[in-house]
Structures are given as C-alpha cells and as structure tokens.
Image: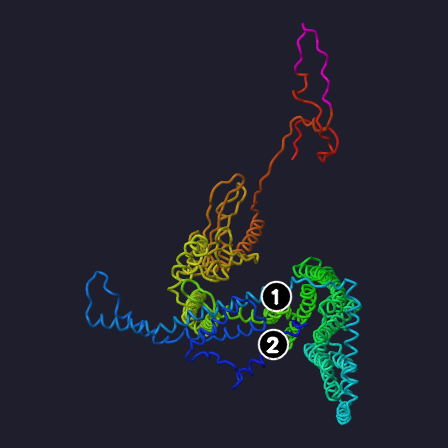
Amino acid sequence: MARYLRLVHLLALALLLAGSFLPGAQAQAQPVAGEALDYEQWVTTAKRAEEAVDAAAASDEALETLRSELVKWREAFDAARSTNAAALETVRAQLAALGPVPEDGSAEAPEIASQRKELNSKLTELEAPRRAADVAWSRADALIRAIDRILRERQTDKLLEIGPSPLNPINWPGAVTALGDGVTRIVNEITTAWSNPVVRAEARANLPMTLLLLAVAAILLGRGRYWTEKLTQRVQGRERTAERFLLGFLSSLAQIVLPVAGMMALTAAGFSSGLPGPRSTLILQVLPGAMVAFAVARWVGTRMFPGSDVINPPLALEPQRRFEGRIHASILGLILAVYVLLREFGQAESWAPATLNTILFPLFVLAGLMLVRVSQLLRLHGLNIAKQDGEQSFRLRLINLLARGIVVLAIAGPVLAGVGYFNAGYAIVFPVIFSLQAIGVVMILQRVSTELYVLITRNRDDARDALPPVLAGFALSVLSVPVFALIWGARPTDLTELWERFRAGFTVGSARISPTDFLTFVVVFGLGFVLTRLVQGTLRSTILPKTRMDTGARNAVVSGLGYVGIFLAAIVAISSAGIDLSSLAIVAGALSVGIGFGLQNIVSNFVSGIILLIERPVSEGDWIEVGGNMGYVRAISVRSTRIETFDRRDVIVPNADLISGAVTNWTRGNLIGRLTLAVGVAYGTDTRRVETILREIAEAQPVVLLKPPPFVLFKGFGASSLDFEVRAVLRDVTQIVAVQSEMNHQIAERFAAEGIEIPFPQQDLWLRNPETLTGRQPPRPAPSPPISEPVQTSDLPPQGAGRAHLRAEDLDIAPGPLHEGEDNK
C-alpha cells in the first residue's frame, strides 16, 4: 500500500529534506550553487558512487541517498556553467573587433598581435572554470543515470519474483495461526499494560480526556457521514444552479474530513490511555491513513454515482445502478484500508512470505470481483450514451476499451498472485483501483471548472463547449499524468529527472531551446499580437473613417498593418527568447528546399494576397466574376478571398487565381454599368414604332442614365422574329436584375396595347403512312394475273407497309383511322 500513500510520503520527505538544510543537520557538506566548488570533495564523492555502481550491492535506500548527493553536485555544476558569462562576452567582442588573423602570411602590427595574444590568454583563463564544470556535470549525470538503471532493474526483478502460492493448502493453517497470534499479542500488550499500577494510574488520570476523544470519535465516525449527506442535499436543493453545485461540492468534502478527524480522535484516545504497546501503537498509527483510503474511495463513489439527479450524474445510469456503484466504491475503499492494516501489521510481526500472501490473497480476489462489476457499469453507461446519441463516437469506443481493459486486469492480477507472482498481482490490481479513483477525481474537478465558468458568465447552454472549461479540463488531464505515473510504479526521482531533462530543453544545430525560452517567446509574441490587434481596431474604428479613403483602401491598410505587426512581434519574441537564428541557418536552408516544393501553391497565394492588398484590383464589397462565380467580395485574407454569391453561398477563391486569371469587376471605382436587353417582334411589324417604344421604356427607368441616352439597336432578321437590342447605362449596376425585370414587364404591356406580336417558334408534324400507327392491316393485294396480262401497280400498297407495334392508346388519341394527308400538330 506504500504506492497509494506515496503522495503523503512525498510530503513527509519534503519536510525531512527541508529540515536537512537546517544548521548542523547535514552530516556532510553539500555543494551550493553560486559558491566556489570543492573539486577534491567532488572527486571523493564520485569515486564512492562509481564503486557503489560497480558493486551494485548497496541497498535501495543507500543508492537513493547517494543519488540525492549527486543531484546536488550536478545542480552546482550546471550553475557553474554560466560562470564569467559577461567577461567572456566582452573578451569575444574585443577579439571580433581585432578582426581575423591574416591568412596570407603577412605579419600584423606588433601592438595588435600583442593585444590578440593577451585576449586569447584571458579567454582561455575565463573558459577554464566552465570547461571543468562541463566535465564534472557530465560525470555526475552519467552516475545518476547508472544508479537509476540499477534501481529500475531491481524493481523489474521484484515484480517478476515468484514466491509461495497462497492457493497451496499447506500455507493456510500457518496463516490462520499467525493472524490469531498477532491479535493475541495485541490483547496481551494491553492487558499487561493495565496490570501495571503506574500505567493504570496514568490511564485513570487521563480518563476524562480519553472519554472526550472517544465521544468525538464516535460522533464523527457514526453520524458524520449522515450529517454531511443531509447538508449536501439541503445545499444543492432541487435547482441546478452553479452556486448550489459548488456549495454542495465543498460540503461534500466533509465526507473525507469528518471520518479522518474521527479516526484521528480515536487514535489520540488510544495514546491518551497509555495502554498501547509496540504492536497496538503501530495499528493506531496506521489507522488514519487507512481511513483516508476508505473515505476518499467512498467520496469519489458518491460524486460519480450520486443518489440524486439534481447534480446531473456524470454517468448515464439508472438510480439502482448508481446505488450499486456507490456500494462497489465503498467496498474497494474498505479493501484498501484493510490491506494497509494487514500489510503493516504483517511486516511488524515479521510474517513469512507464505503467511503474508495467504492472508492478503482474499483481498485480491474481492478487489478483482468489484473491478469487474465496475467495468459492467461502465459498459452500461456506454450503451446508454449510444442509445441517446444514436452513433458510436470516439468517447464511447474509449469507454468500452477501458471497461474491457479493467476486466482483463481484474482477472490477471489475482491469477498472477495465486500462482506465486504476488508482487506482479499487486502491481496490477491496486493501481487499477487507484487509477479509477484518479480518473473520477479529474472528472469531478472538470465539472467544478465548468460550474465556475457558468457562475462567472451565467451561460449554461454553451458552457460545455466553451473554450475556458475545455482548457481547464486539458490542464487537469496534463497535471494528472505524474499522478498516474506514480500509481503505476514510477519513482519520484524518475519524475524529477524527466522534469530536469525537460527544463534543459533540446538542441537544434548549435542552438539550445528550453521551455523558459519557449515561454518567453509565447509571452512576448502574445503581447505583440494583442498590441497589433489594438492598433488595428483603433485605425479601423477611429482614424481611417475620418479620411477620404474608400472601404477597400481602409481594409487594405488595416490588413497590411496586421501582417507587419505580427512579423515584428515574431522577430522581437525570437530575440527576447535568446534564440540564435544564425545557428539555424543551415537547417532552415535545408528545410526551405522541401518547403519550396511542397508549399509552392501556398506561397504563391500568399504573395498574390500581398499584391491584392497593395494594388487593390479587387476590394471588399466589390461585385466580381471569376472562374464562373459571381458575387460580392466579403474578405481578402493572406491565402484566399471569400466571395458571397447571390444565392448566399460562400466561394473560397485562391488569391493566385485573382492575379493570374481573368477577373470581371463590375463595381471597380464606381457603380455605373450597362444593361443589354434582347427583344424580338413578329415579321411585318413597324420597326420604327418598335424602336420608339423601347427607347421610351428605357428612358422611363429611374436608374437609367440619360447621358449617354439609351440606344435601341435593330440587330437583324432572325429565324422567326425581327431582333432588337436595348442598351442602357445604369447609375447603379447592382440594380441590373431589377431594372431588367421591370423593363420586360413594361415591354409586354406596351406591345399588347399596341398590338405588336412577340413571335414564338412553331412546328408542323406531317405523318406518312398514318395507318401503320393504328395497328390495322393494309388491304390485301389482288391475286396476280397471268403473265400475259399487265400488272396494275397503282393498286399495290406502299412499300414497307406492315403492322406496327404501336396502338392508338399509345399515341393518346381517339381510336379510328387516320386519313393520309391529315395535318397533326
């Protein structure tokens, strides 16, 4: 159970480490960053560490202690790497000012040569401490890695170690006897202490305090949970509000605080009596930790499987299933508490491995059974969500995968423990329990962050998909990664080592980029970006509207300023972060070749966007036609231009098409445009009269300009009409459709009043052999006369006549003969 209480142990370790810095606390002097280093002492420590690594016989505790010493030395060496930084920069600048040494063999001036020699000597002297620190840092880092490797190998060997099987019946009597003897020893300790007059007198003297502590413990342990649940239900009420949820969440924490406080009061009562001996003292010391394990598990179960629907349960389960979930969570917490007590008590009693494994094995089996039941609840939650959504989302697949994984591990853990791999079984079953609890805590805190957002914004409808709650959930997930690592066996020193590697950053070329540099870059660039947006907003809303620039020019100025501002912000951020771009020149040159081929279209569109902003052949609000698409320009970005068509569809056009292709801009500079309307009249109509009517109609339109006046063109003689064309210039070409429609209405009305016919195509259909369409047989020919008589060819039927497959009803005409020569239209 040491892993479950690892966080508590880490806090205690932190206090011990803090106490180690007190005067006189250190048995051996440790290096301090920024002070002169004692390299002789370092060599002694390094040799001792190398001997321990080579022998690999020291205990884990001794290796951890030695490792902590090496870490302090490494930190001191890392700080010494920056020694004489300012002086080195000055000397290098002086050498750069002297210029390079002549390469053609010519001698330089004696004064310059002497000065160069002096500066080089000084440079070597200043670099000596840094080089010594680099060498020592590398040695310390290598030793730390070697110790970590030894500890990891030992941890792996311990997991794969096979011991006595708890399923062996030979071990059962000894386990029962050992457990009974342990309980008997505890009772004997208390009885022996009470038989001592001094202890009995002290217990009687402390009896009031003991009884008071026992009463407090009984009240907190017996009624604390009931009071907490009632308080939480009363605070939450029947309304789903953020205030009530947050207050209910805070009051629910008493489900952890009150039982732990009651157990601490019980422990204090036991010590106050003076009766506990060594074994009972150990039990009393472990009881608060065991209660923490039980209370936390029960609290997580209560929040994940609430009894009321007021707080919107995290899992889509029926009330009966949620009740089962609370029971399973409480049983798992009880298993953790009993495991803590038995393991610590067994180690104190020096139980044999066979005895300890046999006594603890039933807890493994029960824990596996409870985990299987929890996995069933998770799968049921997934099925309910699938019924509600009607589809299998990634979240549902993840839930099903988690449920199956829990079942596999819940079975594998007890099986491994039963065959003798007890440590491996423990490393599977209990981390699964702790992981489920950690996932539950993360989900609860995510819900708390969402309710805080609702409390601030008063917007519950969009709270689930809003950015702040999503970022808060992502941050909680990231912060929980070290917790999961500790749960599944990672050592705290492994995490600290990873953090140090992360802080050290990575190297690109000869430049080292660390998280601090990245954070500086993000902050400076963010400030520059915000400042650019503020300046853009000020220009757009305050300054530019007071100028004589049109809308397109103002948008071009604002967009150009934005690009320049972002570029300058990036340059300043890179300089502030201390990133040397010159060291990345080779890498950038190599990447530019691939980028040039892979992103040539994007670069072309980007350059075209800049040309559009500078030349402004197209501006926002213009009515253009490009590539068969016609509409208004709504936005011009770096890569593309958005056009809104007349049917309210957005068409994204690459900027390169606007520069290299043909573009018709109907409203460039002004809104004047020409309307061309085709009209046809029947042959025989007075063309002069038609021309007069069309001119009058065009001049009567309010949008048509009279200078130049409308013009009516007699285009020519069509197949079935006399063709005219009205050409009129409009002061607002955007009204061309409305003007065209109105003119057509007026033309139809005037032509009808004047008796002018608008022709339309007509066709006549002439049928040969219509009798074939009726299905009737043609008259049979007369018998052939003798050869000597002439043949009457006029009585023969037409060639090719025969019975057709068509019927009269197929032609949708009345049945009857169709006489040859009848006209059908």
**Residue 155, numbered label:** 1
Which of the pair 120/88 is nearer the observer? 120
Q: Residues within 10 Å of mark 1 (few under 14, many from 20)?
A: some
Left or right of 145 in this view: 4: right
Local SS, label 1: helix
| Residue 751 vertical position relative to residue 704 in the rendered view, above or below | above
Residue 127 location (% of width, % of height)? 35, 72
Residue 403 location (% of width, % of height)? 71, 61
Quarter of the image for the N terminus: give it. bottom right
Left or right of 719 in this view: 466: right
Local SS, label 2: helix
Residue 249 location (% of width, % of height)? 69, 78
The residue range painted magenta reads 777-793
Residue pointed to by mark 2:
10
Instruction: Return the residue found at the far top.
Output: 788
Give the quarter of the image for residue 561.
bottom left
Can see residue 541?
no
Q: What residue lies at 70% left-to-right and 78% top-to-bottom?
A: 286
Q: Amino acid at mark 2?
A: Leu
Please tell me which of labels 1 and 2 falls first in the chain: 2
**Residue 40, numbered label:** none
Give the quarter of the image for residue 271.
bottom right
- Whole-number angstrom distance, CA of label 1 to CA of label 2: 19 Å
Q: How is the image coloured?
A: rainbow
Which of the pair 749/62 is nearer the observer? 62
| Residue 668 vertical position relative to residue 324 in the rendered view, above or below | above
Q: What residue lies at 37% left-to-right and 76% top-to-bottom?
A: 84
Q: Amino acid at mark 1?
A: Gln
Residue 624 drawn in magenta: no
Residue 616 location (% of width, % of height)? 41, 61
| Residue 213 vertical position relative to residue 637 in the rendered view, above or below | below
